[in-house]
Amino acid sequence: MRFEDSGTESVWEYPRPPVAVPCAQRIRVAFGGVVVADSVRSVRVLETSHPPVYYLPAEDVRTDLLVPAAGRTRCEWKGTACYWDLQLDGRVSARAAWSYPEPLPGFEPIRGALAFYPGRVDECLVGDERVSAQPGDFYGGWITSRIRGPFKGSPGTGG
């Protein structure tokens, strides 16, 4: 299964259950004028109806700017997620990132990697393209010009 070609991708062609796919594109996250993550070793998680979520190795993230946040959630496919607040120069973005310390089988490639909500940081880039956040406040998908919806999380897509 190959999803990283030069064409566009419909989220309705992504699989269910989701898959974790290595990604060599440059992924960057900025907050408060600082690049907090920069990687060419991310993993994209692709799931029907969702824009991709990029998980970046902790080694490529300014983890010194992350503080554990309260709460956990459980994904039937990936396992239990923990959350991270992003803090920089007195500015805080609550639960800006999340990770799976012990992912379920099939998602070992995202163990300890960090994903960021595009709407909770100042900028996320795939290559040189600035992404848009997936609608809603729960899912953290990254929308680029290559990704076609409609996307889960938009008004009227519940259930």
Image: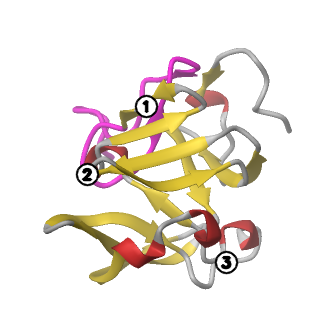
Instruction: Identify the residue position indicated by label 2 in the image.
Output: 32
Which of discs 1 and 2 lies nearer the camera? The answer is 2
3D distance between C-alphas at marks 2 and 3: 34 Å
Q: Quadrant of the N terminus?
A: top right
> Closer to the N terminus: mark 1 or mark 2?
2
Instruction: Identify the residue position indicated by label 3 in the image.
Output: 104
Residue type, label 3: Leu
> Residue 85: horizontal and vertical position, in percent?
28, 72
Circle number at residue 131: 1
In the image, what residue occupies the spot 30% across and 55% down? 138
> Residue 98: horizontal and vertical position, in percent?
43, 68
Which of discs 2 and 3 lies nearer the camera? The answer is 2
- How many residues crowd mark 3 within 10 Å: few (<14), some (14–19), many (20+)? some
Contact (Cβ within 8 Å) of mark 2 with mark 3: no
> Closer to the N terminus: mark 2 or mark 3?
2
What is the span of residues highlighted in magenta in the rendered image? Answer: 134-159
Q: Secondary structure at mark 1?
A: loop
Contact (Cβ within 8 Å) of mark 1 with mark 3: no
Whether residue 78 is visible: yes
